[in-house]
Image: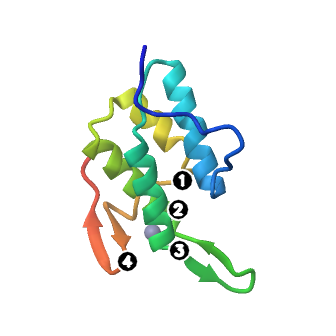
């Protein structure tokens, strides 16, 4: 079966821990004949960078995990992923999806569709 995602090239390192986790899930999906598109992975990584905040005192640059999970969920829906594939994606993100039906992307409050 020919799939559209390409595994990481030998010798290339994922840019972040999140990227590494998403690549691992892509490969897990691939083994089951399911596809997590590269465009979804890139969209989630771009969101995480765009919404990163520095938390003192450790100066960790990270974004809100509930919002990140909500964005990944919305992207999975936009990409028409099957429930099984969606679950593989969402396993990367611990915790709840958004905040009582909403999440933020920079200054924008976005409703999370029912699930
Ligand atoms: Zn949040």
Which residue is found at the position 62% from the left and 74% from the top?
Answer: 61
Q: Are marks 3 and 4 in contact (CB under 8 Å)?
A: no
The answer to whether 55 appears left or right of 26 in the picture is right
Residue farthest right in this picture: 58
In this view of the protein, can residue 75 be seen by the observer?
yes
**Residue underneath mark 3:** 52
Label 2: few (<14), some (14–19) or many (≥20) C-alpha neighbours in 10 Å: some
Quadrant (top left, top right, bottom left, bottom right) of the N terminus: top left
Q: Are marks 1 and 2 in contact (CB under 8 Å)?
A: yes
* Dot in front, 2 or 3: 3
Label 1: few (<14), some (14–19) or many (≥20) C-alpha neighbours in 10 Å: few
Where's residue 46, x and y in %?
45, 63
Which residue is found at the position 39% from the left and 47% from the top?
Answer: 40
Which residue is found at the position 40% from the left and 36% from the top?
Answer: 86
**Residue underneath mark 2:** 65
* 41, above or below 56, in the image: above
The answer to whether 80 appears left or right of 90 in the picture is left
* Dot in front, 2 or 4: 4
* Sooner in the amino-acid sequence: mark 1 or mark 4: 1
**Residue underneath mark 4:** 106
**Residue underneath mark 1:** 95
* Sooner in the amino-acid sequence: mark 3 or mark 1: 3
Q: CA distance from mark 3 to mark 4?
A: 9 Å
Label 3: few (<14), some (14–19) or many (≥20) C-alpha neighbours in 10 Å: some
Give SS at disc 2: helix
């Amino acid at each position: 079966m020919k799939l559209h995602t390409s595994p990481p090239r030998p010798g290339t390192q994922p840019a972040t821990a999140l990227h590494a986790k998403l690549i691992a899930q892509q490969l897990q999906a691939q083994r089951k004949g399911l596809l997590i598109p590269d465009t979804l992975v890139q969209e989630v990584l771009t969101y995480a960078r765009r919404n990163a905040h520095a938390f003192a005192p450790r100066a960790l640059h990270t974004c809100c995990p509930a919002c990140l999970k909500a964005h990944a969920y919305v992207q999975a829906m936009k990409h028409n992923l099957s429930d099984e594939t969606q679950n593989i994606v969402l396993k990367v993100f611990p915790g709840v999806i958004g905040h009582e039906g909403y999440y933020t992307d920079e200054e924008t409050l976005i409703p999370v569709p029912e699930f």
